[in-house]
Image: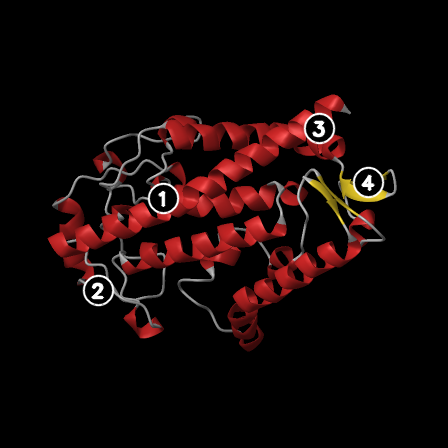
Amino acid sequence: MGVLAVVDWQDRRNRHRTRAEGLVADHLARRSRGEKHPVFDFLFEYYPVRPAHLKRWHPGVGVWLSGEPEHAGWRDYHRRDGLVGVDAAAFWERRGTTATYIRNLLLRTATNPPHFDCFGLHEWAMVYHSGSPRHDLPLRLGRAGTDEVVDSHRLRCTHFDAYRFFTPPAKPLNLTVLDRESQPDNDQAGCVHATMDLYKWASKLGPLVPGELFLDTFELARDARILDMEASPYDVRDHGFGVVAIETPAGKAEYVERQRGLAERAKPLRDRLVNLISAAEHIRLRS
């Protein structure tokens, strides 16, 4: 919160752009060559965020910019008392219902009991008894071996956006029947996909979110995606990744350790997103 002098916000903007360009450089280079990446393209395809979105710096709600920033011509910004900042009232008029839903979901995710016993089996359930895997990658244990891993475990997925891609034979095996309406009841902070989704929610909150926080959620989603695929039934070693063999006790232990680490990193980011939504609502009510 507060006012940034021209030299300060320009410095933050420039450092943000440099950081963002480093994060998206490989993706843009591959795209220029027409190359696909089975792990990282997910961050720009499943999540509809363009590299240009990541490069655009926002100061965040409640922060005002001196001088003549380009933000003055952007949607949901306005000028007040010679300063430029987020127009919380305009944003809330357009996106208040969405912001309220996101805040409720994030708060419920934080307070629902965390689970660290799924072992990433959602990806296995997405190819269970299927002849058409979702990714053009070899199965590390083959078709029969992959199905055997699912048959020998309990599926405990709590995230609807993973569950909805389960194959028809796999869905009845899940401990809980999931749907969109019950997502706030089931999402929990241990879930790798709920952690990745902080990136999605930050993108939907747009100018409320400082650019630096948006990039933090992207980096966290990238690291969660790596674990997701290293623990999946796919063999990603030819792309420079490792294997988390969740069918073994050692693999399960590694998965849980990394899952907990991601959840710990996610907590302050989730809290900040909740606080930004509340700040925007408070400013809107006062305006």
Tell me which residue sits at (43%, 31%) in the image.
180
Contact between marks 4 and 1 (CB within 8 A): the answer is no
C-alpha separation, residue under disc 3 versus residue under disc 2: 53 Å
The secondary structure type at the circle numbered 2 is: loop
Whole-angstrom CA distance, mark 2 to mark 4, is: 54 Å
Q: Which residue in the protein does label 3 denote? A: 283
Q: Earlier in the sequence, mark 4 or mark 3?
A: 4
Find the distance from the CA under tag 4 to the CA under tag 1. Answer: 36 Å
- Tag on residue 263? 1
Question: In the structure shown, which secondary structural element does the residue marked by tag 3 occupy?
Answer: helix
Dividing the image into 4 quarters, which one contains the C terminus? Answer: top right
For mark 4, give the secondary structure. strand
Q: What residue lies at 69% left-to-right and 60% top-to-bottom? A: 11
Give the residue at mark 4: 78
Judging depth in this view, the residue of 129 and 281 nearest the camera is 281
Q: What residue is drawn where x is 27% and y is 38%?
A: 171
Q: Please tell me the numbered disc located at residue 140.
A: 2
Please indicate whether residue 72 sits to the left or right of residue 229 in the image: right
